[in-house]
Amino acid sequence: MRETVRIIVTTYFTSGFGTTERELKLDDLPVRGTLPTWLRGTLIRNGPGTFQVGQQRYRHWFDGLAMLHRFAFHNGRVSYANKFLESRAYDAAQANGRISYSEFATDPCRSLFGRVATVFSPKLTDSAKVNIARIAQKYMALAETPIQVEFDPETLKSVGVFSYEPKTFGSMTTVHPHVEGDSAYNMVTRYNAISHYRFYRLKSNAAPELLAERPSREPGYLHSFGMSQNYFVLAEFPLVVNPVSLLLWLRPYIENFAWKPRRGASFSVIERRTGRLAGRFQADPFFAFHHVNAVEQGDELLVDLVGYDDASIIQHYYLQRLADPTIELPWGTLRRYRLPLRKRRGRVQGETLADACMELPRFDYERLNMRPYRYIYAVGVQPGQRQGFYNQLVKVDAASGKSWAWHEPDCFPGEGVFVGAPDRQAEDEGVVLSVVLNAAKGTSFLLALDAQTFSERARAELPHNVLFGYHGEFFSQQ
Ligand code: CO
């Protein structure tokens, strides 16, 4: 019986949550099918490169040491390189052979002296592994910890660090800044007796500009925020922390947060121009990592996100659980909350726009962020095969609820990044790029789906496995 289990586990756990052993640089990956000739540029993906340091394992999918993967597209050909992100956390792990910095759900071992040091100055990771963005002309690897790492997109080498606030201890940020023109916007949670959510604008060659702040006694765990033409949208879920426990730091970061459903959820709508509160709306408790889009339509502000009934998804991402091939992940689904801006207050209810399981949602952000849109691309779980990890890519039509899926036996796709055809007439004219793990072979490939038909256009095979990562970004070169 034990043997059977081990064989099934091998199908995705060892190659998806183990290590990517090598740093490679390959000029030409073997391509099957045809990539569009207009696809010119670079996809950079971020995620963990190892879940193990020496004999120590990290505990959660959101732990691990950052590795960047670079796919460059030119004339239908694809080159590839991968490299661990240089950081103090990585250097210390290499030098000591053990986990040396605190991650999302893993702390370094506490010795008698180490414990004291950790309580008063937690060594938060600077291994920025969650997302990639070009902010104020700089390529940044982003983490929820306040230190963001700038890297060279050609060599993947680190070239500097950035932080929103001069004091780098005591705050967290989202890894999903919004970009509009030459400005980027992000939210920082600064923990204190009274904590504050702070919204910043970043422009090149200028210090971060504080645009708005909202106080909170028990701030929530927030992974992203909404932004429409005129407003920031702060969706607060009842997964909250008493900041004192972050100061004491008796357990890893996320384990200081508690689910308090009686608080319900709320939406604060903040005017971007003035920083003033324009409305506050209550909702039944729910949880989300990802906002998708926020669109002003008449008197309403439509807030779309991938919602869950509670925050148990975080528990499901512990590696101990993911190693069990019979687990079923809670399903996130596309939800829309309509906030009546004129009323300024009141209760709102979410509407589920599609039944499909979704996570890591993407859409045509470049053209349709803050604007009416229809199509969202995401990873999901097949309705007929619910056990294990995300095993398909989906495309959802927010207008009709219709969905399309791509799946293949033994294949586990990562985030599907939409890249629009430069002269597109239809919203979904373009490709969806995803790094897919073929667990039977123990290797990964880059998949390009036609975004309209959601069928395969091409794939480029890698000679090794890429661990389950989070986010990436495509940078066009026209
Ligand atoms: Co995210």
Image: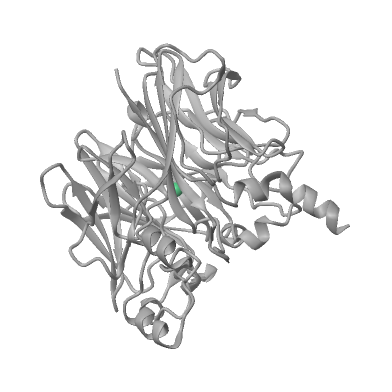
Which one is in front, 9 or 19?
19
Q: Position of residue 83 (x, y in %)?
A: 41, 43
Q: Position of residue 437 (x, y in %)?
A: 61, 37
Q: Residue furthest front?
A: 95
* Residue at image coords 35%, 74%: 122
Q: How is the image coloured?
A: one colour
Q: Is residue 459 above or below residue 325?
A: above
Q: Is residue 271 left or right of residue 398?
A: left
Q: Residue furthest bottom?
A: 112
Q: Is residue 22 left or right of residue 477?
A: right
Q: Quadrant of residue 443?
A: top right
* Residue at image coords 43%, 60%: 94
Task: Note whether residue 120 is visible.
Answer: yes
Q: Position of residue 409 (x, y in %)?
A: 73, 33
Q: Is residue 432 above or below residue 323?
A: above
Q: Residue furthest right?
A: 1
Which one is in front, 463 or 191?
463
* Residue at image coords 17%, 47%: 273
Q: Quadrant of residue 33?
A: top right
Q: Is residue 193 above or below residue 150?
A: below
Q: Is residue 324 left or right of residue 466?
A: right
Q: Quadrant of the N terminus?
A: bottom right
* Residue at image coords 29%, 51%: 149
Please state the total of marks drawn on the protein image: 0
Q: Quadrant of the C terminus?
A: top left
Which one is in front, 201 or 132?
132
Q: Position of residue 58 (x, y in %)?
A: 54, 63
Task: Note whether residue 221 is visible.
Answer: no
